[in-house]
Amino acid sequence: MIKSSSIFIILLLAVFLRLILLLIFWNQPATILDEKHYLQLAENLANHQTFSLILGQPTAFRPPLYPLFLSFIHNSLNEINLNTVRIIQILINTINIYFIFLIGKRLFNKNTGLMAALLFSIYPSYIFFTHFLLSEILFTFLLTLLAYSFLLFIDSKKPLYIFLVGLFLGLSALTRSIVYPFIIILFLSLLIYYRKEWKKALIWGLLLISGYLIVIAPWSIRNTQLFNQFVVVETFSGTNVYLGNYKNTPPNHPWKAIEITGEKAYYYGHDKELKGKNEAEKMVWGIAKAKEYMLSHKLQTIKRTFFKAFHFWGLERSVLGFFKNKHIEHL
């Protein structure tokens, strides 16, 4: 029989492991391009009340919630102290572990919840990424809250919980845009699963969408007005998909394509096509170019997809690489 204090021991272990690593990261500057973008956006939000990388040029290049999170810290402390951000992210990550325990306990039993919490506590990537100024920690926490709210709804069928699911999905999408289409899957799943109670299911579905739109609609409207083109969350997705699917995409580190310059750069030879386009139009252009390349290089696309999946689940190599090379610029 596992004692009731076990979860608190696991939480203490999680904090201890993350604080040990914090000593290594203490005063470590932001070196990853994404970190620099988030910091610049947050500073401009805090100091000039504008979401822009370059003052005078409003943008939707990145999702807004993580920069907003950093700007809140800036407004509270009059600066963005990187060590403070890391400590706050350790706290968020630790709370996340507790909710993972609650999910496992509710779905299966207490022992399963404890095991899930323990695995999350000691998993290297989750420890390591608490110290980067990246959106992973906040995003994972929001997804966990979404999942827990959904479980509460299934057990109780209380409308508040399905509204919270939509709310947390919207917040998740404003942190990492990849999840924003998931609202369609959730809505259809509700209608199908509760088809015998279709009237209630429809009301629950509308509450789900309402919670989602309350969060995401103001940002989407702002973007659409800014670019005269519908942009749900961000415009970097178009560039990103093309970076991962053009002839010079690095096979082992596809995300490093953004660093390539000169004749092998993704934009090389496209000056006339890109001239005069705003970032939303470049997003559409990037998606179209990526589709064109993937359809004309089907076998290579299949191989790349396999390697990308492999690299995605191989984040621990980044952890080992940090300690081996004593820097993080290669990530």
Image (cartoon, rainbow, N blue to C red):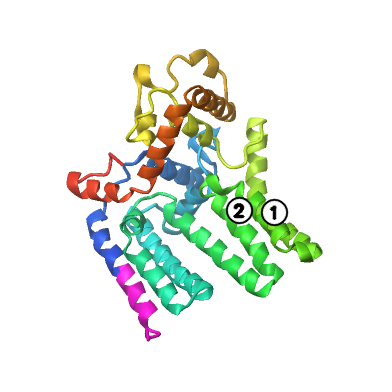
Q: Position of residue 54 (x, y in %)?
A: 47, 33
Specify whether residue 72 is in view: no
Residue 188 has which mark? 1
Q: Position of residue 37 (x, y in %)?
A: 42, 40
Per the image, is 3 magenta?
A: yes
Residue 21: in magenta span: no
The amino acid type of the residue labelled 1 equals Leu
Dot 1 falls on a residue whose secondary structure is: helix
Expressed as whole percent of the image width and height from the top left, the position of residue 203 reads: 77, 62
Answer few, some or many: residues within 10 Å of disc 1's Cα (few below 14, many 20 plus, some between 14 and 19).
some
Q: Which residue is mark 2?
A: 170
Residue at mark 1 to residue at mark 2: CA–CA distance: 17 Å
Position of residue 242 relative to residue 36, above or below, is above
State the residue at coordinates (35%, 22%): 261
Q: Position of residue 61 (x, y in %)?
A: 51, 36
Residue visible at 27% across and 47% down in the picture: 317
Residue 33 — which label? none
Tell me the kind of residue under disc 2: Gly
Judged from the image, the secondary structure of the residue bearing numbered disc 2 is helix
Q: Main secondary structure of the magenta part?
A: helix
Give the residues in magenta.
Answer: 1-15
| Residue drawn where x is 35% and y is 26% of the image | 260
